[in-house]
Image (cartoon, helix red, strand yellow):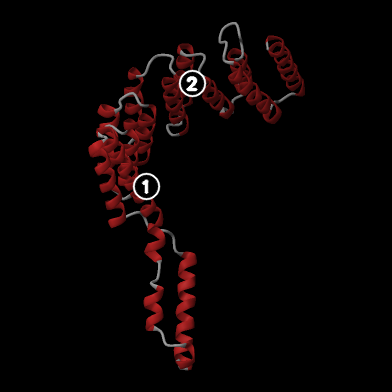
Amino acid sequence: MAALESRTLDSKIEMDILDALDEIKAYNERHERVDRAELGSAQKPADEMSAKERDEMAAFKRAQAARAVDAKPPPLQGSSSDEAVAVLDRGLSFLKHAPDLLLLKAALLEATGDVDGARLVHESLTEHSAPGLLEAVLAHARFERRCGSREDVLAIYNGALPRLDAGSDARGLVQAALARFQLTVLRDANAARVTLENSIREAPQCRDLWVAYYALEAAADDAAAPKRVSALFAAALDDSTVNLPMADQKALWALYLQHVEDMGPEIGHLLEVREAYAAWLRRTRQLA
């Protein structure tokens, strides 16, 4: 009986949350909706209107239509968002460490302009509720990129790494995200390169790190960049040292071929890469 009551309670919480999300989705529509029944009751039949009244009504309808086309949805605010947060809080009173609900609450608070409230939720999640959760770390860093400072983002990434197992996919994804931030936001390619080189030495079988490293070198515009790209793929696809899973090797080969097709400076190099790929395919078929 206790288990049944617990399942019933969980179902009710889930339904409340879904209802709140539906309410948020419909908010913008309700905000601009005209109560047609009320409007209709206030209008005279067309055949009872004077010419002036008909002209005024036509002008009113044209203005309404133009406003509907030009209007942008207002930011989430008011009772709808408050009710959604209240529903999430009720759910969290029973599921105190539910990361998905906490992340949703943080997003709602940020959307309504409560940046301080959203920051408290993110900090609670990454520091106490789920300190090693990949989604929480990335969401917190992205929040601070939007609403905080660059130093805050770096602190989040660097603070999360010691909590993640060395060589794990989660740690690799955080390192790749840190390198992208260093490259695209801080505009520090050298720092991004150091991050990726150190990370790959630690976890050479993390495909996401190799992809991030490729993105870094492919974006470089110096004369040595093509050689660095070739060296990168040669290292990643070296079975004797890295030995990536077959599916990851195939994905990197596809990326390498696309890069050489689109950006390779010489046809000779393109032909070499095609031949190397064909040789790899023959080896994999023999092993199958």
User: Toward the viewer: 215 or 219?
Assistant: 215
Q: Position of residue 72 (x, y in %)?
A: 44, 60
Q: Which residue is at a point 37% across and 83% down the rendered structure image? A: 42
Neighbour class for label 1 at 10 Å: few (<14), some, many (≥20)?
Answer: some
User: Toward the viewer: 205 or 79?
Assistant: 79
Q: Position of residue 252 (x, y in %)?
A: 61, 22
Give the amino acid type for the residue marked by disc 2 in the picture. Answer: Arg
Whether residues under marks 2 and 1 lie with C-beta atoms below 8 angstroms apart, the answer is no
- 132 left or right, relative to 227: left
From what the image shows, is residue 34 above or below residue 180? below
- Closer to the N terminus: mark 2 or mark 1? 1
Q: Which residue is at a point 57% across and 10% down the rendered structure image? A: 243
Point out which mark residue 127 bears.
Answer: none
From what the image shows, is residue 55 above or below residue 176? below
Quadrant of the rendered image containing residue 120: top left
Give the amino acid type for the residue marked by disc 1 in the picture. Answer: Leu
Point out which mark residue 18 bears.
Answer: 1
Q: Which residue is at a point 25% across and 48% down the rendered structure image? A: 86
Quadrant of the rendered image containing residue 280: top right
Q: Which residue is at a point 58% across and 20% down the rendered structure image? A: 248
Q: CA distance from mark 2 to mark 1?
A: 43 Å
- Please give the residue where the numbered disc 2 appears in the rendered image: 193
User: The N terminus lies in which quarter of the figure?
Assistant: top left
